[in-house]
Image (cartoon, coloured by chain):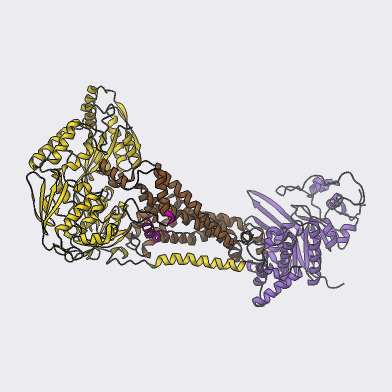
Chain colours: A purple, B yellow, C brown
Amino acid sequence: MSKIHTILEVKDLRVAYAGSGERVQAVNGLSFGVQEGECLGLVGETGAGKTTVALSVMGLLPERTSRIESGEIIFEGRDLLQCKKKEMQAIRGEKISMIFQDPMTSLNPVLTIGEQILEGLELHNEEKKSREELIARVHEMLELVGIPAARYHEYPHQFSGGMKQRVVIAMALACSPKLLIADEPTTALDVTIQAQVLDMMSQLRERLGMTMILITHDLGIVAEKCDTVATVYAGEIIEFGTVEDIFSGEAHHPYTKGLFDALPSLVSTERRLKSIEGLMPDPTDLPAGCKFHPRCPRCKPICREREPEPVQISQSHMIKCFLYAQGEEEMGSR
Amino acid sequence: MTRWMRRINILLIFALLAGTLSACGKQTENTPGSAGSQPPAGPSVKDTIVVSTSAEPTSLDPQYGEDTTTQRVVMQISDTLINVDENMNYVEGLAEKWEIAEDGLTYTFYLRQGVKAHNGDTLTSEDVAYTVERGKASTLVAKAFAAIDRVECPNESTVIFHLSYASPIQLAYLSSPSTGIVNKRACEEMGNEAFGRAPVAYGPYQVVSWDSGDKVTLKAFEDYWAGKPAIDNVVFKVYTDSNTAAIALQSGQVDVVLDVSTSDMASLEADNNVAVYTGDSLIAYHLHLNCTKSPLDNEKVRQAVNHAVDTQAIIDACFEGVGAAKMGSFIPKLSLSEDPGDGSYEYSVEKAKQLLQEAGYADGFSCNILVTSGVQEKIAQVLKAYLQQVNIDLTIEVYEWSTLLSMVESGGYDMTILRIVAMVPDPDLSLYTRFESSQVYNFSKYSDSKLDTMLEDARVCPDPGRRTQMYLEINDYLWQKAPTVPLCFTTVINAANAGIQGYHTDPRGFIRVCELSW
Amino acid sequence: MGKYIAKRILWLIPIVLGVSFIIFSIMYLKPGNPAQLILGSEATQEAIDQLSEEMGLNEPFFVQYFNYMKGLIRGDLGSSYRNGNSVSAEIAARFPVTLRLAAFSILLVCIIGIPIGIISAIRQYSVIDMVSVVLALVLASMPSFWIGLMLMLLFSVQLQLLPPTGADSWINYILPCLTLAAVNLAVVTRMTRSTMLEVIRQDYVRTARAKGAGEGRVVMKHCLKNGMIPVLTIVAIQFSKLIGGAVLVESVFAMPGLGSLLVTAIRSSDTPLIMGSVIVLAIIFTVINLVIDLLYAVIDPRIRAQFAK
């Protein structure tokens, strides 16, 4: 086994938003790690806290309304939460890049796409390359994502949704970042375009040896593109493992099982889709004990009182649930 | 496409900048020693005097302008046959002496010798004849020449006016700037339009420039017949806002303010660099009572209104006590050689009520008054309070001037306020246009054939002594009939830099710069 | 593009026709006789009648209108009733003063107001934000002539630093432009502030930050251009208002501008002068609108694309 290097480690992160008197607990003691070169899928419903985690890593949380209450985010040996503004600005775009969900609004309509990609290069031009050299790099990036370099001078409104997202990707990758965080990059695109964009992202990832965190609620994408998976619920990671662990494994957190059960099946004929009862908990008023317990079909009395500790089912697989607390395995079943 | 856009962009920016900058370019106008462009500090440069006036002259041509603000500039440029002194007595002007025939139909003027025009020509009787002719053709000043039937020029320095009817007022007109003599040659060469901007005449100053809406600049005429004036340059600058004019005077930007408002008087009087001058005027305010409409068609009612109103209170409230004076007669003192005395009605609520009762209006009545905004509105409010005391309920209606005129024409009103401005100190000008029955501005719609005859006769009476008596009778008659409530005579208030010598007010609102010096 | 500009300029014809007809009708129907106003309150009926005849005021409406339009087509705006001067000469004499007044005031408003608006938006709810909003509102609530007089008293009388009146050199413009700027500041500041607030929340701003851009660059490069279109509109409107509407300030500072020309003309029912002034103003407004529309295209490539069609 080659040296496995943890490029990013999030330890016990707690983030809250303060707005109109209420305190929204968005992230509650969340921990995970990403190895160099792999693709981690962060899965969960809307409002689980996935984007907040991503923004915390980037240092892009809104200043006035959010507070990182505790935790560490270790990247290349440094705790990002202790970094000053200028240090974070140097890291953003160069070491860690992020792309967002809606390509239609992610690009500045009054600047050419070439200029916008160039901007990232200009901001992180430590080697003092000349403008021509930087522009050449922009052309390189455009070719890389499948856009003719001649379109440098065109404006975002002249591109389709899929092409725009490619531009966004080109922007994010221009400085060859070590880590790319992609927040639902294909959700706003057609299914066919989705496939194209995702394929391109995988190829680039392999070529550039880049690490990626892919935030999504689409298990199909996770299955195809990710190496490791973390399930996020109510601001916590409740299950973590390799793609095999999660998709082919027997043991699961009841929530993860619920997610899988909710997928329509191509093979069996069912009259109704199975959904998980109840709703995500109100982040201003989280339940005591295990946060999933009000919706859990296998809830035990202890679940209501105490929070479960992470349990290593196997070397790579972690589940945070009292069902596995004694190391006993249960048959995954219907 | 984008390159073209960029070019348009640059072009537009340049056009905007160029437009603004070029408008900046031509700024310093060559006004000699204009005090306006220097920052203010103490007395102005001593060869210039800056006079503030409330409105621009309509024309500098003597025969084409007839309002006060126009004539006060014209009189610096164009001299008349006759002048008036401080007490409104006639003195020589361009004419050395004159004779009036017994029947008042022939006026002979002997012109001064060697009077030079601004273009070097010498004054001859031809210029006078020419002036009379063009004056008659101009609707604006025709009335000043109306009585003159024909002009005879027996020689170069004698002019004889043959009048078609005796008109004692003619002398007064001949002292008014509207009869200023113009140089015939220049006028014919330039044509009326150009002449109106820069006339050539026989006065102490000539025109340097006229910046529309801003100022008129004059310079002293070297060969003026009475000697070159002491002050070389005169600038008449337009200040529509009287507060601004007062501030400009205090800061030294302006040397004389001709239309001082009463609200500025206190601060001007307190300023040691400023001297305030007051004097009588020929302007009166009347409260016109519609004599064709009940109940004001009743003489007793009108007299009651006279008793009910305390005019001193109006003077205090609306003119700060200093801007106006009590009106004891319909004719200003300056216009008569004899003192008309005080015929005004005593302020007495009881007498008013008694008269109303006699007229059958013991319970009073309602009526309305038409006024323009400003001073007239203020006066109306004071009136309302006083009339309330005798149960007369007054509704005040404020209108813009043109609208008010048409409302008066149609007759739907009880009272209105109107000023009368006598351009020359002759009693006819304080009476005729307001009380003769066919006049447009007879806002009382007072129609009395006896009065009409009295006015007509007095107009043409050639004997001065007899004429004065006739006007005294008219004055008494008007008090008795009370077609109006005479409210007040306004006071002329001027303010000037304390360094100016020889200043005095002129009841006509004029200024004679050639008499001033630093 | 050239076609677009040509079309807009052609629109001037119906605009001028419409404006002239409306104003002429109003003046015709309005009570009051210009001849009577010229002759003053001591005139006789005969004089009034004669002058009315001379001025052609007794002709029927369409004859008068037609005569006026005949001159207008030739570029002759007629002569003022009040003093017989050519209307075009009167307007031309006043126009530079008004243009300078409006241009410098708007420049002041932009130089002061736009940065304050931007700072207010970036530091929302900070002290600067609160103070500037309140201050702008207070200034906007005060009557312009009062501000003008106060400035004049302070700087000309007490401190003797600046000339109070006149339009002779650029120094004379300082106080009036300050006055006009003070009154118009609020609108531009508020508009800049609200547009910037909106723009700052946009996704592309987040993208820029994610690239590592600092706040300064984010604002200047990304926010400004996007926020300028509504601000430009407001500035254009204010400028147009100033061209014809600075009457009070012109009066207080004794500056011979278009605004006071128009007011004097209205007071004397001077129809040719009113017509000429309003037509010139209408043309100016149209041209300003055209320039602004073109500027939109310069700023925003999406609008530019529409022009290309």
Does residue C77 show up magenta in the picture?
yes
**Residue at point 21%, 46% (across, down):** B143
Indicate the position of residue C133 as horizontal and vertical percent values. 50, 53
Going by the image, does B395 lie left or right of B453? right
Q: Is residue A39 above or below residue B350?
A: below
Residue nearer the viewer, C83 or A151 = C83
Indicate the position of residue B217 as horizontal and vertical percent values. 27, 62
Magenta residue span:
C72-98
Indicate the position of residue B311 as horizontal and vertical percent values. 23, 37
Q: Give the residue at the far left of this rendering.
A: B102
**Residue at point 66%, 61% (across, down):** C204
Residue nearer the viewer, C65 or B219 = C65
Q: Is residue C122 visible?
A: no
Going by the image, does A48 lie left or right of B351? right
Q: Is residue A61 above or below residue A271?
A: below
Q: Is residue B358 above or below residue C61?
A: above
Does residue A59 show up magenta in the picture?
no
Image quadrant assignment for residue C201: bottom right
